[in-house]
Image (spheres, rainbow, N blue to C red):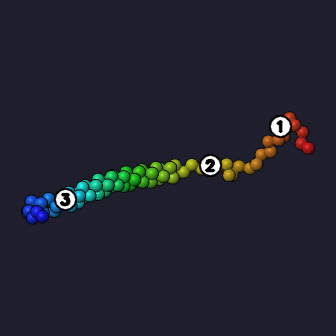
Amino acid sequence: MSIPTYSSFSNLAAAPLLVGKQFVIGLSITFLFFFVLLIFVIRKTYKLKAENERLANLNIDIDEDKKEYQDFTEGHLYTKE
């Protein structure tokens, strides 16, 4: 039976630190990805809002609802039955 030395204990203690460090790096990369995605979404939202306001200010009146119905069958070649 061998007696554990100080160096073997330090190796065991360093192993979880490496795993924890990799975990933190992974979380950091994931956070950075979603943060950049959030920035793009917020930017797109402001652009769409500005476009919506611009289109609302055009104030285009479509007169199709105000037009009266015209009978288009009067000039038709077929007879009404």
Q: Which mark is residue 15?
A: 3
State the CA–CA distance, disc 2 to disc 1: 27 Å
Q: Which element type, helix, strand or loop, lies under badge 1?
A: loop
State the CA–CA distance, disc 1 to disc 3: 91 Å
Where is residue 22 drawn, in percent x and y?
Answer: 24, 55
Seen as rendered, the residue at the extreme left is: 6
Q: Which element type, helix, strand or loop, lies under badge 2?
A: loop
Amino acid type at mark 2: Ile
Whether 5 is drawn above or below 37: the answer is below
Where is residue 14 drawn, in percent x and y?
Answer: 16, 59
Q: Which residue is mark 2?
A: 62
Amino acid type at mark 1: Gly
Crowding at dot 2, Cα within 10 Å, few <14 / some 14-19 / many 20+, comes out as few
Amino acid type at mark 3: Ala
**Residue at position x 29%, y 57% from top?**
27
Q: Which mark is residue 75?
A: 1
Dot 3 or dot 2, earlier in sequence: 3
Crowding at dot 3, Cα within 10 Å, few <14 / some 14-19 / many 20+, comes out as few
Where is residue 39 drawn, in percent x and y?
Answer: 35, 53
**Residue at position x 67%, y 48% from top?**
64
Quarter of the N terminus within the rendering: bottom left
Q: Which mark is residue 6?
A: none
Please report contact status of discs 1 and 3: CB closer than 8 Å, yes or no. no
**Residue at position x 46%, y 49% from top?**
51
